[in-house]
Amino acid sequence: MLRKASQFLAALLLTACAGLPAGVDTVLDVSPETASAAAWLVPKLHLSKPVMVTEDALLEQGLFGYSRNLPDRYQITLDWRLDPDAKNMVLIHELAHVVHWEHGGGGGEHGSGWGEAYAEVFRVWVQEK
Ligand SMILES: [Zn+2]
């Protein structure tokens, strides 16, 4: 069980990604649990642009989620079939990309800069929840 959980977390770290997957054409409404988590977490990150969170079918493309840095907002999309806890972990992963972009985005997509951003977002999630 622990092994499965750690494999899942490693997969989240590696395969949730910032690239835009091909063929995303239908955006579903976000689940109440995810909307609540985003509404609680995002304001605590003090970002320069709003964050829009949506859900779609991404697993077929090997993704749990992805994020985009748009001129007027950050866009995060999560696979709608993940359970709420997994969705929260992917949300944190993608918010780390957002925070990384806010800090300049250096060091690669999942490099040390992103890792520091991930720690920052996760610290807020764990300590203030
Ligand atoms: Zn990523």
Image (cartoon, helix red, strand yellow):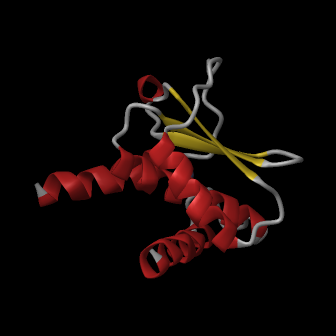
The residue sitting at 28% across, 50% down in the picture is 8
The residue sitting at 45% across, 82% down in the picture is 127
Task: Tell me: 22 left or right of 59.
Answer: right
The residue sitting at 58% across, 26% down in the picture is 28
Number of numbered discs overlaid on the protein picture = 0
| Position in image of residue 70 (x %, y %) | 82, 45
| Position in image of residue 68 (x %, y %) | 71, 44
Task: Tell me: 60 left or right of 83.
Answer: right
Closest to the observer, 62 or 74: 74
Query: Residue placed farthest to the right in the image?
Result: 71
Image height of 57 relative to 115, above or below: above
Give the quadrant of the C terminus: bottom left
Q: Is residue 54 visible?
A: yes
The residue sitting at 56% across, 76% down in the picture is 120
| Position in image of residue 79 (x %, y %) | 47, 34
Image height of 104 relative to 90, above or below: below
Image height of 58 relative to 1, above or below: above
Give the quadrant of the N terminus: bottom left
